[in-house]
Image (cartoon, rainbow, N blue to C red):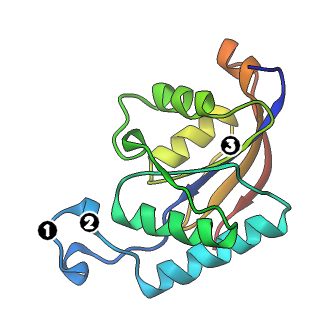
Amino acid sequence: MANEINNLVLMRHGNALSRHESGVSSDSERTLSDMGFKNALTSAKKLKSLNFSPDSIISSPCVRAVQTAEIVSEVFNKPEIQILSELATPNSIESLLEILLKKEKAGNSLIAIGHMPIINLLSEIIIPKSAFHFSPAGFAYMQINTKDFLENPQNHGKLIEFFNL
């Protein structure tokens, strides 16, 4: 892995309906609300306005996260979405972060779409001493030297933009 800066966006899924409203029995099957679709679109457009362009979009397997990823994918004309089960149920936050960072190639940009508190905790590892409270479809756009960070987590990332609706 080259010693280069990578762009990483951690995004929370859009606002979801309750299990009852979605007509499903499992939390993982909950769908986005109308507001969730609108907010995901607003956030994706905001991210695009920052001249961010993802090489990869990775999503939790939960329906509401996949639907958010599909909206983001459409805005960026990136049809492929990778599913990563650890974004819904990580063994540990540190191991999830390592998985995400190892998916990046030097100089690439990645969007990871997941849930609270996981997205919040990941952000706080990369940008310590920051309080992140993601609203639905909120995101943190960061730059990180992946190689340096993996070798020594004391080498923190840099926050470019934190966006909440």
Give me the residue at 62% from left, 77% from top: 41
Give me the residue at 77% from left, 37% from top: 6
Would residue 65 appear left or right of 73 to someone viewing this image? Answer: left
Give me the residue at 76% from left, 21% from top: 155
Residue lying at the far front in this picture: please name it.
79
User: Which of the two discs, 1 and 3, labels the residue nearer the N terminus?
Assistant: 1
Q: Picture coordinates of residue 64 (x, y %)?
A: 39, 67
How far, Cα to Cα, is label 1 from label 2?
Answer: 8 Å
Callout 3: helix, strand or loop? loop
Neighbours of disc 2 within 10 Å: few (<14), some (14-19), many (20+): some
Q: Amino acid at mark 3?
A: Ser
- The reply to whether the C-beta atoms of the residues labelled 1 and 2 are less than 8 Å apart is yes
Q: Quadrant of residue 103?
A: top right
Residue 133 visible in rendering: no
The residue beneath circle 1 is 25
Q: Quadrant of residue 100?
A: top right
Q: Picture coordinates of residue 81 (x, y %)?
A: 52, 55
Residue 130's label in the rendered image is: 3
The residue beneath circle 2 is 29
Q: Quadrant location of the C terminus?
A: bottom right
How far, Cα to Cα, is label 1 from label 3?
Answer: 36 Å
Residue 60 visible in rendering: yes
Q: Amino acid at mark 2?
A: Glu
